[in-house]
Image (cartoon, rainbow, N blue to C red):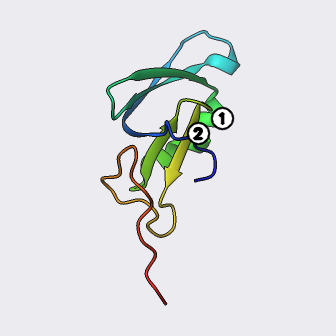
């Protein structure tokens, strides 16, 4: 899939921490816990968090590519990934028309 590598993992948990008094460019920090239990911390601005927040609350599938430090929100429209997708799975079969 675009924006990912073969190291892409499903995100199990996302927490946001606000660093009071920090520079605007690092005011927030996302804690991402992936399916392998690995914890990753990503600095994020308030504007970026405002844009990303609604996507994190949707019923989509959240993925993280550590190679590119990329968060991928799947299934915004349609179902490309099954809800129980894990690393190594392929996209779901597209029904014939």
- The numbered mark at residue 50 is 2
Question: In the image, is 33 to the left or to the right of 55?
Answer: left
In this rendering, position of residue 30 left or right of residue 67? left
39 on left or right of 3: left
Q: Residues within 10 Å of mark 1 (few under 14, many from 20)?
A: few
Q: Does residue 74 lie above or below 31 as drawn?
A: below
Query: Where on the picture, by quarter, is residue 69?
Result: top right
Q: Residue drawn 51% across and 67% down?
A: 77
Q: Position of residue 85 (x, y in %)?
A: 35, 52
Q: Residue at x 39, y 52 (%)?
A: 89
The residue lying at 30 percent from left, 53 percent from top is: 84
Q: Dot 1 lies on which element? A: helix
Nearest the viewer among 82 and 48 is 82
Give the residue drawn at x 57%, y 41%: 5
Q: Give whichever of 82, 6 is nearer the camera.
A: 6
Residue picked out by circle 1: 47
Instruction: Report the Cα–Cα distance between label 1 and label 2.
Output: 5 Å
Which residue is situated farthest in the top direction here? 21
Establish if 48 lies above or below 95. above
């Amino acid at each position: 899939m675009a924006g990912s590598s073969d190291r892409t993992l499903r995100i199990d948990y996302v927490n946001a921490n606000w660093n009071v008094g920090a520079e605007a460019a690092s005011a927030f920090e996302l804690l991402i816990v992936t399916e392998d239990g690995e914890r990753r911390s990503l600095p994020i601005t308030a504007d970026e968090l405002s844009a990303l927040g609604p996507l994190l609350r949707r019923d989509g599938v959240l993925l993280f590519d550590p190679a590119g430090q990329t968060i991928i929100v799947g299934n915004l429209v349609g179902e490309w990934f099954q809800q129980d997708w894990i690393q190594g799975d392929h996209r779901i079969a597209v029904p014939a028309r």
